Image: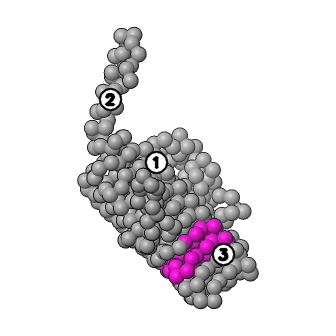
Amino acid sequence: MDPIFFSADTTLSLGALAEAAGVSLPPGADPQAVLTGAASLETATASDLAYMDNARYGDALTRTRAGACLVAPRFAARVPAGTLAMVIRDPYRIYAGLLARFHPDAMSPGSLFGSKGIAPGAHVHPDARLEAGVRVDPGAVIGPGAEIGAGTVIGPGAVLGPNVRIGRDCAIGAGATLTHALLGNRVIVHPGARLGQDGFGFAMGPGGHLKVPQIGRVIVQDDVEIGANTTVDRGASRDTVIGEGTKIDNLVQIAHNVVIGRHCVIVSGVGISGSTTLEDYVVLGGQVGVVGHLRIGMGAQIAGSSNVNRDVPAGSRWGGTPAKPVRAWFRELTTLARLAERSARDGEEPKA
């Protein structure tokens, strides 16, 4: 890791690593030996921890110089002799926890100015209420009646509108704007995100389109993460809600009145139209489009670039345009490929 940006805050002994991973050290390993950081298989040195759980990186594993490697059982035999193999079922998850111990500051956006308290150049309305330990960078604007919990960081140029509520230990990135929004604890809003602006609501007619006032809010529950330049519109007549623990990537559009359940994962480029509901643990792949007023059931997964135009049952896996169960989608793709091959053999151009 580049020490300019990410220097490790601590060192960990092999014994501490094994305890955290829930494994025993192999015979002959020194539990007092120390690792000073973590790195990829390709760049790790003898003082680094690495991990491996994907067959694509098998060659990199055989050549790694890492001091220790968290590795799935099926790849353990490929760990080189100079690297201590720590065999575990879920290497990536354990690695993530250990990486956070080495680099806790990388877990959420911090002050870009090194602020302690309210920095010069920040604009905090006298009617705003900030608990102890809030840090506000230069250029940030905090409106009247806003409330911010202890340990929260407000990045440079961020704007918090009147009466916005932000819980404790949150991070609001540079240039983000929040209006008509209530955020829980430990929420991360990355730079440039927009929460609480008007939903796209118009009563259309031949004489013109009449704007419909949007009088709802955005409710963001605890432990949510919202990516850079993502937009979350406030509700029209009810709230837009993002449930506890949900993770939203960059460049996602969430329209008015959308309700997203707990622990959902929404990848970049997704657009969710108004009044749609995602139940808990839903996963939407990159660039999925969801039309309005639908329900996607608990635990459903939608493949990237799909278009969802009807309700999706709980626990199902769908893909394609329009989206359908993946087996039906794969059958369609296979049939089309065979028709194209047959036409090519017959010397014909496939018909549109």
Left-right relation of 114 to 98 = right
Range drawn in magenta? 150-178
Horizontal and vertical percent position of residue 334: 32, 29
Quadrant housing residue 10: bottom right
Horizontal and vertical percent position of residue 5: 68, 63
- Mark 2 Cα-neighbour bin, 10 Å: few <14, some 14–19, many ≥20: few
Residue tagged 1: 287
Measured in 3D between alpha carbons, the distance from the residue under mark 1 to the one under mark 3, in whole angstroms, is 32 Å
- Tell me if residue 153 comes above or below residue 77 in the rendering: below
Q: Earlier in the sequence, mark 3 or mark 2?
A: 3
Give the dominant element type of the magenta stretch: helix, strand or loop. Answer: loop
Q: Secondary structure at mark 3?
A: loop
Tell me the number on the disc at residue 120. Answer: none
At x 51%, y 43%, the residue is 57
| Residue at far right of view | 120
Q: Amino acid at mark 2?
A: Thr
Quadrant housing residue 124: bottom right
Q: Earlier in the sequence, mark 2 or mark 1?
A: 1
Mark 3 or mark 2, which is nearer to you? 3
- Asked if the residue under mark 1 is in contact with the one under mark 2, i.e. CB atoms within 8 Å, the reply is no
Magenta stretch holds residue 9: no
At x 34%, y 16%, the residue is 342
Residue tagged 3: 140
The colour scheme is one colour
Q: Secondary structure at mark 1?
A: loop
Horizontal and vertical percent position of residue 320: 36, 41
- Asked if the residue under mark 3 is in contact with the one under mark 1, i.e. CB atoms within 8 Å, the reply is no
Measured in 3D between alpha carbons, the distance from the residue under mark 3 to the one under mark 2, in whole angstroms, is 54 Å
Measured in 3D between alpha carbons, the distance from the residue under mark 2 to the one under mark 1, in whole angstroms, is 23 Å
Left-right relation of 302 to 128 = left
Quadrant in which the N terminus appears: bottom right
Tell me the number on the disc at residue 334. Answer: 2
